[in-house]
Amino acid sequence: MFKKILIANRGEIACRIIRTARAMGIQTVAVHSDIDRNAQHVQLADEAISLGGMTAQESYLQADKIIAACQQTGAEAVHPGYGFLSEQAAFATALGQNNIAFIGPPANAIAAMGDKIESKKLAKAAGVSTVPGHVGVIETAAEAVKIANDIGYPVMIKASAGGGGKGMRIAHSAEDVETGYATAMREAASSFGDDRVFIEKFITSPRHIEIQILADQHGNCIHLNERECSIQRRNQKVIEEAPSPFLDETTRQAMGEEAIRLAMAVDYHSAGTVEFIVDADRNFYFLEMNTRLQVEHPVTELITGLDLVEEMIRVAAGETLRHQQSDIGINGWAMESRLYAEDPYRNFMPAIGRLSLYRPPEEKHHDDGSLTRNDTGVAEGDTISIYYDPMIAKLCSWAVDRSAAIGRMRVALDDFVMRGIGHNIPFLSAVMEHQRFLSGDISTAFIDEEYKDGFQGVAPSPDRMRDLGLIIAAAAHKDAQRQSSSPGQDWAIQFVTDDPAQMADANLRCSFHLCQQDTALTADISPYADTAAGTTDAISIEIHQSADTPRVAASITDHKDDKTRHYICQLHKNKDSWQIYYRGTHLAAHARPPHIASLAHYMKPVIAPDRSNMLLCPMPGNLVKIMVADGDVVEAGQTLCIVEAMKMENALVAEKRCRIDSIEAKAGDILSVDAVIMRFADANA
């Protein structure tokens, strides 16, 4: 067994590999860019070597520097994680030439499967079903359009060396192909150093289901069941689970056999994943093979009990697989939510900044037998930059069945406190309560179909609105207690909204009284609009507030039926209003004595300045290209510029016909959120 290995990666996957290596008694070496010199993976490793530079191209993609780091530290093997050099055959070959083991598959398998064009040819030869398409390199946009026209729309333009949703575009017309071809090539070159793309038929509303395989160097290969990865946005996976709620045992067995057949055809060893798309009739088609550890591998570990990183290390050291196919079953159900640094309320634009608060839920086995796991590579005080992937953590849950695993995930998301940057926890929480997701009726089009206008938050039911109002009232009451020896007993809770009529029934008037237990409050509550009628309900509410975070745990009991509802939400006071966040719902409310609340309609609202004549940068990023000039008249939908953030290109388009009055930025500028890129004037002015 190896005594020391180097991890050629960063972030959560580097930390995750280090944990397993440490448990195996193996020393670890971290590598890092200049911006990552204080990163968590650097602090966890036994040694660390600087690669210099800021970007991936200057650091983590520099194979020569990584090999030199191995020689300097005496590392006997390299685990590449995923991304970066993990699927570069030349890197695996170079390591072998320097007597350094590669904790991954052989170079010939990486080359065969890493090239999406060649992999489809090999899959066909191995008897694996494939998606119709053009299996060959496409040289020009005109050629791409001709091929797409022949295949029939919609089509998928894909990077040959791609993965992780980068270098992929769906095209519904010849115009889409022309623009998508250029964008896919640029993203592919930026992310993988290879700009080749190909085109295949896009199967509408498919499921994305993948088979995990594990093979040794002695001809043994098994599969570890499937993962459902259909909840995606822009071809980037967001939520994964194992097993799939859609597959039956017959389809599972058939997919597993094809995955093993393909692996054996290329003399594969190590962990790997064969990805399929599956239609509504459970017909499945080979998509690609990822010759590396997958981001979503924890859900497979949770239902099989295997540590895939450990198995990879043992295979690389020449050991025989410790398990046979008959040993592999499915124990319970696992969920994974990818936490990204992005703002779901701004069309999921990437976010950067400092994690002023970062308090994940506790990783543990719970009293009901379920489990919470969090794979992360950041800590409170760390900074999320524009240079790397926006994933912050992979939050996982396990339970005896799918419903229980979803329930545990909901609570884990509730309990995750993160401030300082935009993040997608509200969206993940919303999906976990979405009826279509709960039923298992999902496809890769789920997000596009269910959130056509983007994520606007979740409108709470009247009962939930009332409960959230009660939590605010109880917190306001306790806050008043801390500030005064004789706080007021009556509170009017008025929600802030653009449509006051919508919230009228949810506004509350609460009269609180302390219980003798000193931790609970009893309240007589009534709708604020109906206080004159004197209709009230008696409830008890107990809240526990964290001293250094906005986390609030609340239990609310209605005395009329003695049923108790439990909440973990986030609440903080902002000037004269309270902000509460719970499962995709964000509400602002004023907690005031009734006589002050009655005067609220005299308070003038603050009017935001008009910035409709400006193009504002919706995310922090690099202004790659400006497509217009001063004085140009542009049409609605016309691309104005391209901003690259976290390896993804984003085209900013005109909302209506107008004239470019002035351009305030230039190509190459690093822009912050809401930076002014250009100003508009009336097209006829």
Image: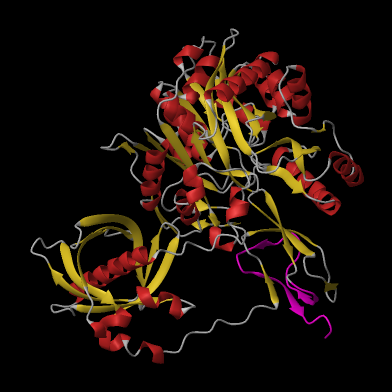
Q: Is residue 585 left or right of residue 51?
A: left
Q: Is residue 30 visible?
A: yes
Name the quadrant containing residue 397: top left
Please determine whether, in this image, residue 278 is positioned above or below residue 266: below
Nearest the eye: 574 or 316: 574
Quadrant into which the C terminus falls: bottom right
- Please name the residue shown 37% across and 87% down the image: 600
**Residue 298 part of the magenta segment:** no
Q: Which residues are magenta?
A: 656-685
Q: How many marks?
A: 0
Judge by depth and name the residue closer to the eye, 435 or 23: 435
Q: Residue furthest top?
A: 218
Which residue is pictured at 47% across the width and 40% down the height? 336
Q: Position of residue 165 (x, y in %)?
A: 66, 42
Who is closer to the viewer here, 161 or 236?
A: 236
Q: Quadrant of residue 327?
A: top left
Q: Position of residue 363 (x, y in %)?
A: 35, 39
Side (left or right) of 228 relative to 261: left
Farthest left residue?
A: 516
Does the image show residue 323?
no
Q: Position of residue 180 (x, y in %)?
A: 79, 49
Q: Position of residue 187 (x, y in %)?
A: 73, 46
| Residue 178 to residue 209: above or below | below
Vertical position of residue 503 compared to residue 413: above or below: below
Q: Residue at x 70, y 78 (%)?
A: 613
Q: Residue at x 71, y 28 (%)?
A: 114
Colour scheme shown: secondary structure
Q: Is residue 284 left or right of residue 249?
A: right
Q: In the figure, 537 relative to 141: above or below?
A: below
